[in-house]
Image: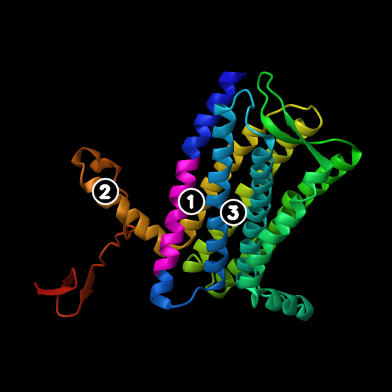
Amino acid sequence: MYMNKVAIWVMTGLLATTTVFFNVYILLMSIWNYRQKKKWSPSETIILALSVADVAHQLICYFWMTMDELDSKCLIDQRPYTVMLLLIYSLKFTIMWDTSFLTFYYSTKLVSTPNHCYTQIQDAILKHVTLAVCLIPLLGLGTCMPMLMVFKSDNITAANKDCGILTPTNNIGQVYEAMYLILSDVLPGVLMVKCCFSISFHLAVHLRKMKASSNGAHRPKLGSQMRVIQMALSLVAVFILFLVIDLYVNYQISVNHENIIGLTFCFTSIYTTVTAMVLIYGKKTFWKALIHEFNVCLDEYPCLYCLKVPEQKAKPSTPEKVQTCFSQEVFVLNKCVIV
C-alpha cells in the first residue's frame, strides 16, 4: 500500500509539472496580449482565472502530498493539513465552475436563442464577467468553510493512511458532503452538458442550412468557429469523464471508507493538464506560438528533427486544368503555347 502511495505521489509530481507549465504559458500569453490590446476579452478573463486556479490548486495539492510523505508519523500539528485541504477543495470548486462558465460563454456566442428573457439573463451575466470570476472563488471558500464544523480532522498513521484527513463525523456531515459534491461537481456538469447539447444541435442545423444553400456542391466551412466549437465540446467531454471518476473515488472514500485521497489529487492533476492543453489549442495564437517555440527548441538538437511539428497545414494540391483554345493553342500550366 505504501508503494502505491509513493507511485501516486511521483505520478502527481510529473503531472503537476505539465499543469504548471501549460497554465503559466497561458498566463504569460494572456499578459502579452493585454500589453498589446490594453484589454482582455471576456473569454480571456475567464481563461486567466481558470489558469490561476489550476496553478494554485496544483501547488497546494502537491505540497500537501509531499508533507504527507515526509511526515509519515504525523508529528506536525494537524491544523496546517486541515487548512491546505480546505483550500484544495475550495480551488477545486473554483476550477469546476470556471470551466463551466467558460463553456457557457462560448455557447452564448455560438448559439442565438429566440427566448428574450433568457437572452437578457445571458447579457447581464456576460457584462459582469470580471465580477463573476472574482465571486466564484469566494463562493467556493464559503461553501467549504462548514467542513471545519461538520468534519473532523484525524491523524491516522496506519498503512495507506494520511494525516489530517477531513472526514464526516455524523449524518449532518454526510449530508453536507453530498451537497458539496452536488454544488462543486454535478451542477457545473449539468450546465456544461446543457451547453454541449445546445452547441451540437445548432451546429447540426447550421451545417444543414449551409449544405442546402450550396446544393451540396462543396463541404460547408466554418473557419475559426469550428476551432472554438471543438474546444468547447472537448472541455465538456473531459469534464464529464473526470466527473464520473471523481464521484466514484469520493463514493469509495465516503461509503467504503477507503483512504485514497491521493488518487483524487492525481486524477484532478490529469484533468487540469488536459484542460490547459485544450484551451491552448482553442486559442489559435497560443497554439501557433507554442508550436513555433517547440520547433525552435528542437532546432538546437538535430537528432530530434523528426519530432518537429508543421506550423502550417499543407495545402492540398489541385491538378492544373488542360484546356484547348481556338487556332490550335494549348494552355499548359496557364501559359499559351502555339503548336
Give the residue at x 43% y 72%.
Answer: 34
Work out which residue is located at the far right of the displayed protein and give it. Answer: 171
Residue 20 on the magenta segment: yes
Q: Is residue 222 visible?
A: no
Above or below: residue 40 compared with residue 246: below
Give amino acid for label 3: Leu
Of tags 3 and 2, which is closer to the observer?
Answer: 2
Residue bearing mark 2: 297
Judging from the image, what secondary structure is the residue with disc 2 in?
helix
Marked residue nearer the N-terminal end (2 or 1)? 1
Q: CA distance from mark 2 to mark 1?
A: 19 Å
Marked residue nearer the N-terminal end (1 or 3)? 3
Along the line of sight, the residue nearer the viewer: 173 or 295: 173
Q: CA distance from mark 1 to mark 3?
A: 10 Å
Above or below: residue 285 compared with residue 22: below
186 vs 269, left or right, is right
Q: CA distance from mark 3 to mark 2?
A: 29 Å
Stretch of the chain drawn in magenta: 16-32
Residue bearing mark 3: 235
Residue 255 on the magenta segment: no
Task: Identify the mark at residue 277; answer none if there is no mark.
Answer: 1
